[in-house]
Image: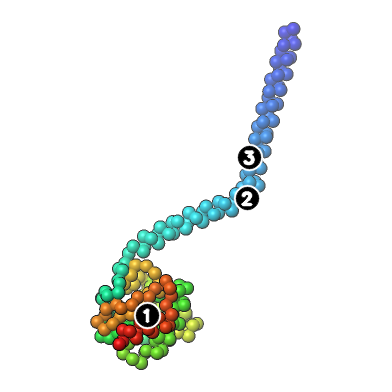
Amino acid sequence: TLTLRITEHVSISRCNSERKRRILNKKSEQLTRFSCSDFFIYLPFMKKVVLIFSFLLLAAGCVKEEQKGADLKVGDIIPDFEVVMSDGRLVTDDDLKENVSVVMFFHTSCKDCQQALPVMQRIYDEYASESLQIVLISRGEGGESIYTYWNENCLKMPYSAQNDKRVYRKFAATRIPRIYVNEKGGIIRHIFTDDPVPSYGAIKMSLENVIR
């Protein structure tokens, strides 16, 4: 009887061990299946999460940058500044105050600027012979890339290449293109931005209203 009970106990123990082994093997198989196939199933989702997180970090950085700068409005006077143009001229705010002027800020990689620059070329071609001054100033873009873009797009206007945003921030904190139409004395009468990108007719009309 004792031998029978010992045998039964050993048999039960083996059975339990076998059951535990099967359970562990099953769990191991489940983990293996998840780590292989399921990983690739959830990979696109993981990429989306990473991209969204990266975008939020970038947006936070942009917001922080956008807080730096002036916010000139119609009726304000253009600030003190001086820039060297690509034709060698030194242009200051005092020069612009002597007559009607146009100041445009741009970057050649900006799609809206790319749309506005040919418009400004037409304005320049039409008014360059008059006393009107048109000054194009880059926002954080060096002369080499501007020179290349000008040649590729047949632009002839003089420009001032600014590697930083110091001049731009005297006028504004956000958005390009920015076009300021100013009357004599440097008083801002019209401001055009990317919303919407101004047409030739809109800029010409604002100039004619100021020239009168």
Few, some or many residues within 10 Å of mark 3 (<14, 14–19, 20+): few
Q: In which quarter of the image is the C terminus?
A: bottom left
49 displayed left or right of 105: right
| For marks 3 and 2 on the same chain, the one whose residue lies earlier in the sequence | 3
Q: Mark 2 points at which residue?
A: 40
Kind of residue at disc 3: Leu
- Circle 1 residue: 136
User: What number is the disc on residue 31?
Assistant: 3
The amino acid beneath tag 2 is Phe
Residue 59 visible: yes
Could you tell me how far apart the alpha carbons at marks 3 and 2 are, in whole angstroms?
A: 14 Å
Measuring from the top left, give residue 142's x and y in whole percent: 40, 75
Is the N terminus in the top left, top right, bottom left or bottom right quadrant? top right
**Between 130 and 36, the one nearer to me in the picture:** 130
Circle nearer the viewer, 3 or 1: 1
Is residue 205 shown above or below 177? below
Q: What residue appears at the point 67 percent right and 31 percent down from the top-left corner?
A: 23
Residue 200: quadrant of the picture: bottom left
Q: Is mark 1 on a helix, strand or loop?
A: strand
User: 50 or 118, which lies in front?
Assistant: 118
The crowd level at tag 1 (other Cα within 10 Å; few <14, some 14-19, many 20+) is many
Q: What is the image's colouring?
A: rainbow
Q: Distance between the residues labelled 1 and 2?
A: 51 Å
**x then y, percent, for residue 108:** 45, 75
